[in-house]
Amino acid sequence: MSNKKSIGILGSGTWGVALARLLQRNGHHVTVWSKFQQEVDSLHKTRAHPNLPGLSISEDIVFTSDVQTACTGKDILLFAVPSVFVRSTAALAAAFIPDGQIIVDVAKGIEPDSLLTMTEVIRNELCKDGRHDNVKLVALSGPTHAEEVALDMPTAIVSACTDMDVAEVVQDTFMDTCMRTYTNADVLGVELCGALKNIMALAAGISAGLGNGDNAKALLITRGMAEIVRLGLAMGCSEQTFYGLAGIGDLIVTATSMHSRNNRCGMLIGQGKTPEEAIREVGMVVEGINALPAAMQLAERYQVEMPIVAGVNAVVTGKITPAELGHALMTRDKTREVKQSEMNVRFESALQRRRMHGETRRVLVGGTFPMLTAEEIAWLKAAKERGTWLAVALVDDGDAVKFESRRESLRALRCVDRVLPVSDWTDLKDAVHNLRIDLIVAKPEQVQQFADQEGLGVEVIIN
């Protein structure tokens, strides 16, 4: 792949157009797609975006309403549509996306019910046709207001992908004197931060709308991040991610800037407007509102206490007033500030020790994993602690959509290094040989399944 790339951008909102300008200035050929012909005509004619004052769009940037034109022959395809349209856009574009395509997503959200992040939604939708098993997905996220990127103000962002070679391709593509790009392998952590920080920005805006000051804003930012970290650790993310650009960096800028739609929407709600009135006045998508249903479902699934998220949800759904939210948060039962679990401490310490000593021990576990509860994740972490590399043999029950969802959930866990599909336990012998497994960790209910197999040639531990 040459330094000069052909890039297709799906979405002509503020972020898509600001990034189009940055990429074109970096020497790349850029095509921007919008579903709406009127929008395409306006951008092509005026070379300006109504919500990006001061931005001048180069004549070299192509605008189109034809999704095939936007997707065909591109080195990188960028999804820059609101989170609620990511799945439908992926479905629309699927026929024109080749397998192996690098796809970068900049939407920030979590799909309700499926609880998939945006890169997982794209993969899930594309894989339905059985022809996109090798697409390379990158989450691009960080403290990046389009209004400032469009004016060449200094900005930093994170390119997150489990394949570091791909993450670095994206890093090189976006990085210039105004945009500093970092890489991170913790895709789930980066995407979780991007979605949940919008809810915390709503809370900060509601507080400001009530007339509270900087102390309250700092309180909500800090304790909001504590809630995000609790959920992220329960889901197997890296704690370092939350204290980086995609985590606390993005939360700070979203909760403090008037460029932030979520902050402005929250402020209007705090001043007495209904959520519907506030969204109309903001005039653009408010992702924090969209993220609330999934955030509530995740908190329930992983049994994580998230009082700020629950409080904002209660305000948005009309169950309490903004003033009642403030009172409820300030009068909660007293608690300690730091509560890192012993299990997470042991997991991180074990990983660090083995890396320092250069040890390698490959562990295999297996099962259907229909739902990744906190107990299941703790069991996987405990299995990983017995080695340095963990593979999961995931039983395929024949339901392609559900299987892909289970596989993506496992892939997102930091403790899981490889997920391989198996039809039943008789596949394990080949897996042990091909993956050079040193140890199998099984659950008590799997004892008979392993007893029925002979010649595995490795130790089996029941845990």
Image (cartoon, rainbow, N blue to C red):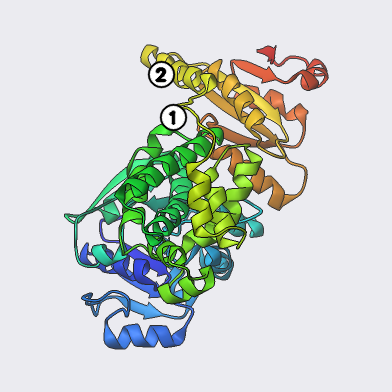
In the displayed orientation, state which residue is furthest to the left: 177
> Which residue is tagged 2?
352
What number is the disc on residue 399? none
> Which residue is tagged 1?
337
Secondary structure beneath label 1: loop
Q: Quadrant of the N terminus?
A: bottom left
Q: Position of residue 434 (x, y in %)?
A: 60, 26
Q: Quadrant of the C terminus?
A: top right
Residue type marked 1: Glu
Mark yes or no: residue 116 visible.
no
Q: Residue at x 49, y 79 (%)?
A: 35
Q: Position of residue 58 (x, y in %)?
A: 23, 76
Q: Residue at x 50, y 38 (%)?
A: 232
Q: Position of residue 223 (x, y in %)?
A: 43, 40
Secondary structure beneath label 2: helix
Using residue 366 as the reference point, say whether residue 22 is left or right of it. left
Mark yes or no: residue 357 visible.
yes
Using residue 63 as the reference point, say whether residue 91 is left or right of it. right
User: Which residue is nearer to you in this view: 325 or 154?
Assistant: 325
Quadrant in which residue 20 is drawn: bottom left
Residue type marked 2: Gln
Using residue 196 as the reference point, say whether residue 114 is left or right of it. right
Quadrant in which residue 113 is drawn: bottom right
Mark 1 nearby-residue class (10 Å; few <14, some 14–19, many ≥20):
few
Q: Position of residue 278 (x, y in %)?
A: 46, 71
Q: Residue at x 41, y 58 (%)?
A: 106
Among the two numbered marks 2 and 1 on one chain, the one whose residue lies closer to the N terminus:
1
Mark in the foreground, 2 or 1? 1
Q: CA distance from mark 2 to mark 1?
A: 25 Å
